[in-house]
Image (spheres, helix red, strand yellow):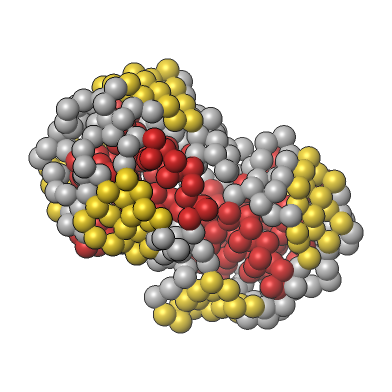
């Protein structure tokens, strides 16, 4: 429940990155010694991944609010629980690690946010290229390989998940693997750093060509995860949409450049420090054109959150989503709040309006839910966001953090 119209002011502390934590947690399945992970966010997606690791045989325990200790078993279970796979798409990231360590893994198609078709074809092709035999049986996908062997792999699209799965699978095995057209997101670099601390030989992350030389086994390590760039971007938009003055920290400035460029283009004042960013807004922003792209382009995960801000901008904005077919599901609710948006497929034309009005809306996925909260912060009256459990998948204590900078927002079971 959000009572809009409050100007936000102050500092928001950014949690560890969801999209770095999940692949690192999956990769820890390959460890043979204990792993300590720091700056892990307390979000439901992490809890699902921990349940998956536990089901596969890993011992998982919290040492404090954001530090995990993972102790591997002598042998992993090779069948991933179907229920957990259906709850979160990132659960497919266990395929590469379990296959590399045990020579077999059984999964089903993963679930997660309903933002359009996201088949695992690239994951399957990558495992096949490394020498895995793959078959389907009663709805389950069975991967088997006596030993994975290095290969040259060309991805048709720079899929983040497929890049991560292939990196893990190729890390333990024989020969050299080269991934061409690899994803370049900062979270890929994080996974490389983590794997190398375990004893892997991976280089090239952050470019479109990643090279992995297989090793016999991996050990353990102590690792701290980077700040979440999407969470940081969300709170910067919260500052902008409320004509506020908000600082986010800690952040890695380079990871935010595409987001900051668009906020600057809209006319908001941005101040960058060594590990923080401040946004100062004194009114409506200007209309812009916005197109999501793989990193280093504008992130698809931030596109939904930008739309409420553009609804209140001067002029007509054009938004195009290139990654997921159903990213614009929250548009209908924004229109009910008074927005003027016309959509055609993945394209949205947004005409700025003087104000939004509070009403009851429904989160259809993680980022759409965050976007509806942002709209509620700026709207006249009260906004109720139903299905808010989607938001908990990727934002740690979003209610508390917004309250800390002046928002009138509470979480309540309806």
Quadrant in the picture for residue 172? bottom right
Quadrant in the picture for residue 369? top left
Question: In the rendered picture of this protein, how many numbered marks are placed on residues?
Answer: 0
| Foreground pick, 298 / 138 | 298
Q: For residue 179, say whether it is visible.
A: yes
The spot of residue 128 in percent (x, y) is 80, 46
Identify which residue is drawn at 59% across, 49% down: 185
Q: Is residue 117 above or below residue 170?
A: above
| Foreground pick, 91 / 164 | 164
Q: Is residue 76 above or below residue 158?
A: below
Residue extending furthest right? Answer: 175
In the displayed structure, does residue 176 sit left or right of residue 306? right
The spot of residue 295 in percent (x, y) is 58, 43
| Foreground pick, 353 / 360 | 353
Identify which residue is drawn at 81% across, 50% down: 178
Quadrant in the picture for residue 105? bottom right
Q: Is residue 216 above or below residue 227?
A: below
The spot of residue 214 in percent (x, y) is 83, 63
In the displayed structure, does residue 340 sit left or right of residue 205? left
The spot of residue 114 in percent (x, y) is 45, 38
Identify which residue is drawn at 78% across, 65% down: 201
Identify which residue is drawn at 41% across, 55% down: 272
Q: For residue 399, say whether it is visible.
A: no
Residue extending furthest left? Answer: 381
In the displayed structure, does residue 161 sit left or right of residue 317? right
């Amino acid at each position: 429940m959000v009572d809009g119209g409050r100007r936000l002011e102050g500092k928001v502390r950014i949690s560890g990155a969801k999209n770095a934590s999940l692949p690192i947690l999956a990769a820890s399945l390959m460890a043979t010694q204990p792993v300590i992970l720091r700056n892990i966010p307390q979000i439901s997606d992490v809890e699902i991944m921990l349940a998956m690791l536990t089901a596969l045989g890993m011992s998982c325990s919290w040492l404090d609010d954001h530090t995990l200790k993972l102790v591997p078993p002598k042998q992993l279970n090779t069948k991933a629980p179907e229920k957990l796979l259906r709850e979160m798409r990132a659960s497919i990231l266990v395929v590469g690690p379990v296959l590399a360590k045990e020579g077999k893994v059984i999964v089903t198609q993963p679930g997660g946010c309903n933002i359009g078709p996201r088949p695992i074809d690239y994951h399957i092709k990558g495992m096949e290229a490394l020498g895995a035999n793959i078959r389907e049986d009663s709805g389950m996908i069975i991967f088997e390989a006596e030993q994975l062997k290095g290969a040259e792999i060309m991805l048709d699209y720079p899929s983040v998940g497929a890049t991560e799965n292939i990196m893990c699978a190729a890390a333990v095995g024989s020969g050299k693997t080269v991934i061409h057209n690899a994803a370049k997101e900062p979270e890929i670099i994080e996974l490389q750093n983590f794997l190398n601390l375990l004893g892997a030989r991976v280089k090239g992350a952050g470019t479109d060509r990643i090279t992995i030389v297989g090793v016999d086994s991996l050990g353990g390590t102590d690792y701290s995860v980077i700040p979440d760039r999407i969470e940081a971007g969300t709170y910067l938009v919260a500052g902008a949409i409320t004509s506020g003055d908000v600082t986010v920290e800690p952040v890695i400035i380079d990871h935010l450049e595409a987001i900051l460029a668009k906020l600057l283009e809209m006319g908001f004042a941005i101040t960058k420090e060594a590990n923080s960013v401040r946004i100062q807004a004194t009114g409506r922003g200007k209309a812009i054109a916005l197109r999501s792209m793989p990193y280093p382009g504008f992130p698809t995960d931030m596109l939904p959150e930008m739309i409420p801000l553009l609804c209140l901008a001067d002029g007509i904005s054009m938004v195009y989503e290139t990654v997921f077919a159903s990213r614009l599901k929250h548009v209908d609710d924004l229109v009910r709040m008074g927005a003027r948006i016309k959509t055609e497929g993945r394209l949205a034309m947004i005409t700025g309006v003087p104000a939004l009005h509070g009403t009851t809306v429904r989160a259809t996925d993680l980022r759409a839910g965050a976007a509806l909260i942002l709209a509620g912060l700026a709207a006249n009256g009260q906004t109720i966001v139903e299905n808010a459990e989607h938001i908990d998948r990727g934002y740690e204590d979003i209610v508390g953090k917004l309250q800390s900078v002046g928002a009138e927002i509470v979480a309540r079971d309806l």
